[in-house]
């Protein structure tokens, strides 16, 4: 495939009918002079644009979008999960970082009400944690919002009362995850109210959730933090044997920062700082590829050598980022991980360890005569929602909200479903946390901004294998000069596996597969457009100064502007 073209329709408004479905597949790039927005759901995008049109700023729009997203996309998020964000404040020219993930209660043993070895998450049952979603929205509203909180809650109340139309993708994702909620009476009542999941095309109404959203509108986000919902949450936790108190709900407040900044080919990139690992991860990957002069090697969708280097760089970054923890508790090795001599050393080792004999026959003998072409793809995680919104004044928000990292696993309290957290004290776990010391959980949120003269010209983020997809899209844009949508559209891979396997979306040529086989590498084909490999929400400023936004082809979603 070409690395400089994309499958999207012409720039402008989409010609697809707006029936509330965000349609998987190619999508139009949106443009606007007064604002743009992008999300995983048309209702969320329309909500954000409505806020902008009514005079709200980008943060107002993002808050309203988050609240309604927890209603219409409970397959990927909820009001008891996590919120992280990068906010560019046009008035001051500053980028602000917000980390409001779910927090482990220090001094209490891990609590997982779903039995070990049971349910959807049998290998790693999620543990109960204190929710970060509403504390994060409260922090954003207090610092940057211009609209009244109750006004921003109105769309969430409406969609919970009236219901939204269930799409095929939503139904498919709910089908994958509903088994987890069948362990609790509240989970069964919420997701299978008449004995089955809401079907495609049905309107899913949730009166209990609507009542909770009305209380949030009336009493503010504190309803979830110290108010009536918080009391219900603590009471249910105590009934199940998790001895938290109401004081634990405010023990670890959201954390503000200025973001983790790094330079690449003249670009200033801002991402979340440790304990979030994504910024260091991306800087390592792009640094190794730069040392290997990847643009002279070719793009990994066409060059076996480039794909070999990319997959190894992703693997190396994953291993090195195991040393990252919360700097409030651990020493921070970031400076040493990204030292030029260290990054150059990784690149030299990789270049010096390539095979110099044809190993095609080895791949055939080890994996079977047809293994060079196919071997079956692994299942990957699906959750989380990313929002992009820019207003007419140049305020810019790139925000992630997710069901991961909040609440009591499998329980639904007053219409709010909860997943808990997979954080464990494990060196290589992407999501890791410690049960004393009060540190924040290490995770993989992908909020990213790229600055020019101190102002954003690009922001992006995605759900689905964030750790390895964000650096690939960034490299496509910053190294190979792709249009942001084309950068998202291009085939992606997972990190190199110890069995000498690279899983890659199957829009690559047989020549690339054969070239990797000669290097002793088996290509593991993912679907041509694998939804588990993310679908980016992206905003950027075009050379003429106008705003653009896009949503990737692997999932549903909508980008729009005015």
Image (tube, rainbow, N blue to C red):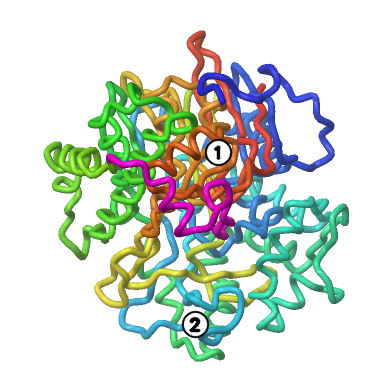
Q: Quadrant of the C terminus?
A: top right
Marker count (numbered)? 2
Answer whether residue 171 is visible to the viewer in this image: yes
* Residue at x 44%, y 82% (from the top left corner): 245
Residue at point 80%, 67% (across, down) = 197
Where is residue 454? Give x, y as percent.
32, 23
The residue where tag 2 is placed is: 112
Mark 1 and mark 2: Cα distance apart in space: 32 Å
Q: In this view, does 378 lie to the left or right of 27?
A: left
Q: Is residue 419 above or below residue 91?
A: below
Q: In the rendered image, which quarter is residue 118 located in?
A: bottom right
Mark 2 is surrounded, within 10 Å at the Cα level, by few (under 14), some (14 to 19) or many (20 or more) other residues, namely many
Q: Is residue 362 above or below residue 409?
A: above
Magenta residues, as a range? Answer: 356-381
Secondary structure under the numbered disc 2 in the rendered image:
loop
Task: Specify the farthest residue to the top.
Answer: 544
Question: Along the line of sight, which residue is nearer the eye, 314 or 211?
Answer: 314
Indicate the position of residue 246 as horizontal and vertical percent values: 45, 78
Residue at x 46% of width, y 54% of height: 136
Where residue 196 appears, as percent x and y from the top left, is: 83, 72
Q: Please tell me how crowded label 1 is: few (under 14), some (14-19), or many (20+) other residues with Cα within 10 Å.
A: many
Q: In this view, does 16 lie above or below 107?
A: above
Label located before the other in sequence (1 or 2):
2
Is residue 368 within the magenta segment? yes
* Residue 536 - label: 1
Magenta stretch: includes residue 545:
no
Q: Main secondary structure of the magenta part?
A: loop
Residue 395 - label = none
């Amino acid at each position: 495939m070409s690395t400089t073209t994309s499958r999207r329709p012409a720039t402008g408004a989409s010609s697809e009918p707006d029936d509330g479905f965000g349609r998987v597949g190619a999508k139009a790039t949106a443009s606007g002079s007064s604002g743009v927005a992008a999300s995983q759901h048309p209702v969320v995008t329309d909500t954000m644009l409505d806020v902008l049109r009514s005079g709200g700023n980008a943060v107002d729009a993002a808050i309203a979008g988050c609240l309604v997203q927890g209603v219409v996309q409970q397959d990927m998020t909820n009001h008891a999960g996590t919120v992280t964000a990068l906010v560019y404040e046009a008035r001051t020219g500053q980028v602000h970082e917000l980390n409001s993930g779910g927090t482990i209660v220090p001094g209490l043993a891990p609590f997982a009400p779903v039995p070990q070895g049971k349910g959807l998450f049998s290998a790693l049952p999620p543990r109960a944690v204190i929710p970060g979603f509403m504390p994060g929205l409260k922090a954003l509203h207090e610092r940057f919002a211009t609209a009244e909180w109750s006004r921003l809650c109105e769309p969430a109340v409406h969609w919970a009362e009236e219901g939204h139309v269930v799409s095929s993708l939503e139904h498919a994702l709910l089908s994958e995850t509903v088994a987890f909620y069948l362990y609790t009476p509240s989970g069964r009542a919420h997701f299978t109210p008449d004995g089955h999941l809401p079907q495609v095309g049905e309107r899913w109404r949730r009166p209990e959730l609507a009542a909770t959203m009305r209380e949030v509108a009336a009493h503010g986000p504190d309803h979830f933090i110290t108010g009536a919902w918080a009391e219900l949450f603590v009471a249910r936790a105590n009934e199940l044997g998790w001895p938290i108190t109401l004081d634990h709900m405010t023990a670890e407040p959201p954390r503000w920062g200025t973001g983790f900044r790094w330079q690449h080919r003249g670009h200033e990139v801002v991402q979340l700082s440790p304990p979030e690992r994504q910024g260091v991860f991306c800087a390592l990957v792009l640094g190794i590829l730069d040392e290997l002069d990847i643009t002279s090697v070719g793009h990994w969708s066409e060059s076996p050598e480039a794909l070999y280097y990319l997959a190894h760089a992703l693997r190396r970054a994953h291993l090195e980022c195991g040393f990252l923890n919360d700097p409030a508790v651990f020493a921070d090795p970031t400076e040493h991980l990204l030292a030029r001599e260290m990054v150059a050393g990784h690149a030299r080792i990789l270049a010096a360890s390539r095979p110099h004999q044809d190993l095609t026959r080895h791949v055939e003998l080890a994996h079977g005569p047809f293994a060079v072409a196919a071997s079956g793809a692994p299942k990957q995680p699906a959750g989380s929602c990313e929002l992009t919104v820019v207003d007419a004044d140049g305020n810019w928000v790139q925000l992630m909200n997710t069901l991961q990292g909040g609440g009591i696993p499998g329980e639904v309290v007053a219409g709010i479903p909860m997943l808990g957290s997979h954080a464990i004290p494990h060196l290589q776990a992407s999501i890791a946390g410690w049960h004393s010391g009060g540190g924040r959980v290490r995770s993989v949120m992908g909020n990213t901004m790229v600055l020019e003269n101190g102002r954003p010209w690009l922001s992006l983020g995605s759900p689905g294998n964030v750790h390895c997809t964000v650096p690939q899209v960034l490299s496509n844009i910053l190294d190979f000069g792709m249009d942001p949508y084309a950068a998202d559209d291009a085939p992606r891979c997972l990190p190199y596996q110890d069995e000498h396997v690279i899983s890659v979306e199957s829009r690559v040529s047989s020549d690339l597969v054969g070239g990797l086989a000669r290097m002793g590498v088996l290509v593991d084909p993912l679907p041509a457009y694998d939804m588990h490999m993310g679908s980016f929400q992206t905003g950027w400023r075009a050379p003429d100064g106008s705003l653009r936004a896009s949503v990737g082809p692997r999932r549903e979603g909508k980008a729009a502007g005015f």
